Image: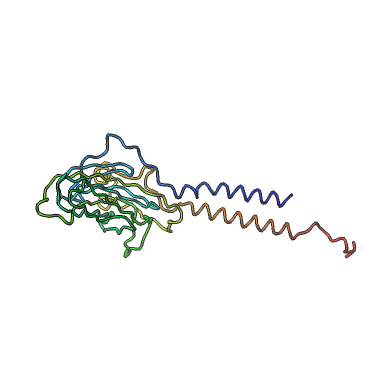
Amino acid sequence: MRITRVLSTALLLLGLAAAPAAAEGTPSASPSEDGGAPTSAGTSFRTATEIEQGQRATASGSAGDYLYWSFPADAEQRPTVKATVKLPGAHASQTWRIDVYDGLRRRQACQWGAQTRTAAEGTPSVELACVLRTVRAWSEPWANDPLPGTYYVRLTVVGLPTSDLGVPVGAEVRVDSKDMGGAAAVDGSLSEPLVPGVAMTSGQDDDAERAAVLSEIEPEDGWSSGWWSDRWVWTGIGAVLAALAGIGGYALTRGSGRPSRVPPGA
């Protein structure tokens, strides 16, 4: 009876642990698209148009322009940037490219995705994609790991005939993230996310000045502190299961009491 209770408790704990494990592999919630989505793009890092994750941004431009957007990405997220370029009916072969930079303006490599694609003559559109590495809460100063903060998307044409220079084009950009959970957790965190203006206001107490300089975008649930992850939950569950296994093993080897073959005076 005692062993049955121990096993029942262990199964209950495993059932409670299955919920966060299933949630790790699901994409993070995305805000609904509405009429407030941006309809223009910046022309440099400083003028990049801010967008939220899950929001479809559009812009009009000319072939040869640099188009910039920025979005927030937090620790344990793996962002995916997708872009679609709509081309005029008549055009020569063009090669388009999408690049992503972190808050320090370091170019981040794509794990996979069509980062550069060529649109053949007369093709109405070309689609690009870049899946970044998982954002880390902390990293060594010499490393090029993606860190929490603002990320910049740059869309431009890298192979363009002179005859197509300046022709009108349209662009659509969307960023989504997958929550990687405790598997991507590290021991440490940044004191501040890498957002524009954070260095200029680090020593100031004026909230009004800080709000005017810092980037206005951040994750829907705010920036995480970096120390908490579901890895702590799994560690606690493992400790409980180890204790229950010890209790069960003791109960199995303890026996029913004093052996009948031992004399009473022994």
Q: Is residue 63 above or below residue 260?
A: above
Residue drawn at the location 57% of the way across and 53% of the way down: 237
Residue sitting nearer the eye, 71 or 60: 60
Q: Residue furthest left?
A: 163
Percent coordinates x, y for residue 202 in the rendering = 29, 51
Residue sitting nearer the eye, 14 or 142: 14
Percent coordinates x, y for residue 253 in the rendering = 74, 60
Percent coordinates x, y for residue 69 in the rendering = 24, 47
Residue drawn at the location 80% of the way across and 56% of the way down: 256
Q: Pick the quarter of the image with the C terminus.
A: bottom right
Q: Say whether residue 105 is left or right of residue 2.
A: left
Residue drawn at the location 57% of the way across and 47% of the way down: 15
Residue sitting nearer the eye, 132 or 238: 132
Q: Say whether residue 92 is left or right of residue 174.
A: left
Q: Residue furthest top?
A: 35
Q: Which color scheme did the rendering employ for the protein? A: rainbow
The number of numbered discs placed on residues in the rendered structure image is: 0
Percent coordinates x, y for residue 215 in the rendering = 27, 46
Q: Say whether residue 152 is left or right of residue 164.
A: right
Residue sitting nearer the eye, 209 or 90: 90
